[in-house]
Amino acid sequence: MATRDTLTPKEAQCSGGADYAALALEALQEPADAAYAKELMDRVADDCQFTKDLAACAIVYKALGEQSRAEELLQTAEDYCMSGEEQVALAEAKFKVLGDKAAAVGAYEKALKETGNLDPLIDLAKNVMRVIADSAFAKKILEKAESKISRAVEYSKLAAASAEHLLDKDYAAEIFNKAAEKLSTVPDLLALAAEVTKTLGDPARAKALYERALHGATDFTAAKTLIESAKQAGDAAFLQAALKKAGELASATGEHIELAEGLASVGDKPGAAALLDKAEEAVAGLDEMQKLVAAVEAHLADDTERLARVKAKLEKRQANHTRYLAFQKLEQEAGNVKQYLALAERVRLELEDPFYAAKLIQAAEALLDGTGYQFSRYKPILLAVDQNLDDVDWLNRLLDRAAENATGFTAFKDLVVTTAHMKHREIGTAKARAFLAAREAAQAADANATVYDSAKLAEVSFAATQDIAEASRLLEAARAQAKDHYALTHIGQLYAGMGNAAKADEYFSAAAASCTHGDACIQFIDRLKRFAMPAATLKKWYAECGTHLSKPADKLRWAEGIADALNDKTWATEVYSQLAGQFSGVEAARFDLSRRSRADLNYFGATRRH
């Protein structure tokens, strides 16, 4: 029971008008001490400067029967109101002091405009329900929150808020339906299924989500999550399905044994046998061999042929135990990707044990998981799998993931060239060509793709496959986009790099012909100079470029390029002599100065002798 004596010590904890108002409302609980409540309000109300404090005090004065004082504070609270959070406090005060629901909704509307994140929106909806119990407006708030969310936990939180505070399970079901449409990962679907059961009590809807999760599981970790969820749900059929799915995705001996024992425990002996087959194939050490033998003895003891075989393998492991122990010690000491991969190669060469090698490569890959994908970092993993194992599925997974992330040209080229030169040449060549075809199709559909994108694709194709015909096809397709000497020269140089001199010359000639002014010719020859061509070849192309110029001013600029770009004073002197007499007025003066500075090297000395 609250009394003045019990409440007074709490005053020391109050730091603002809202705190004192809360204490005053507590004082008004039975047995009410209105005098103490008024004393508290009279002490702090006039000093309040924030909407939250003023609104809280107004509500207390209303409870004390001082309506005019409450309205006065409420008006001041409205005058000071600056933020969405303050509009919430103002809305509650308007409803409780004035009994004006419309005014309260108006304040809530302003608060809604300034509220954008999930948790604040849910809190706002809760406040609306607590103060004015307007479920339609509260739903409007939660509908805005829908546009702000993307994760399973957010959808679940929103649905729970709808069911608990709006008492609207139909709307909660709508939210879960939308989440199910947008989300696809196993953790998200399992989280949704659990929340559907908790919030809606709808096992059929939850089971549909569990089934989707089961279908979508692509790795052993996800499948293990399915198993745990099935156990928690108490669904034996789903548990068996999850165990089988995990068995399809498992790779290590321990994983297969664990799942086999799980299937055996639910009476699926054939399923357990299939998983123990996989476990036997993947054994990578004496301890795993011992666990396998123990599992066979426990669950398939009537399979005498299997039991004899695994026991014989165990004896062989035990006979080479020292060597395996030495490698296991090195494995324990390994701490980075390079060390694991080097050890994997030694295991393959010295022990001829691909399963143990695979285990070490898996450990190396695990170090990279969750660190952000870069092909240059995963490339050693790919090469290790290629060199040491015959695991086509693993290779395909690594290659497909690399292709998904190879958005830049450098990474894409590295991937395609690496793939085409793998030890598993048939797989690598097929994959490389598939990557190139996919890239070509994407570029064809991209309105922003340029001639350089097409040329780069041809460059990658040739670097990977050395297929001149295919690279030429891509380059010829790029020609339609080549509108200037830059692009034509680039394609010509790629042909030169492929050893097709005739095609290179064809494009260099086209590039020269596309130069319509003297500066373009200089740009053209500057680009060719980067290709380390002989001086005679450079002169040939520059001369050809000049033949396409008709205006004297462009020819003069071209002549300047002979001296500036090619540093050929003799040729420049000849050309200037040929151009003499083609200029008049200002242009003649420019020609004269250009000639004197670039071709007539005795000019300045001769001038000083006069």
Image (spheres, helix red, strand yellow):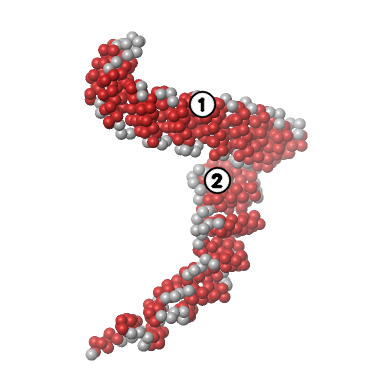
Residue kind at label 1, given as amino acid type: Asp
| Residue topped by disc 1 | 168
Which one is in front, 544 or 373?
544
The answer to whether residue 4 shows anywhere in this view is: yes
Q: Secondary structure at mark 1?
A: loop
Q: Quadrant of residue 294?
A: top right
Q: Along the horizontal axis of the image, is 470 left or right of 163? A: right
| Residue 335 against residue 166 in the figure, above or below | below
Residue at 40% x, 78% y is 554
Q: Residue furthest bottom?
A: 610
Between disc 1 and disc 2, the foreground one is 1
Q: Along the horizontal axis of the image, is 300 left or right of 186? A: right
The answer to whether residue 381 shows anywhere in this view is: no
Residue at 58% x, 44% y is 362
Q: Quadrant of residue 32?
A: top left
Of the numbered discs in the image, which one, if any, rests on residue 365? 2
Q: Secondary structure at mark 2?
A: helix
Which one is in front, 573 or 413?
573
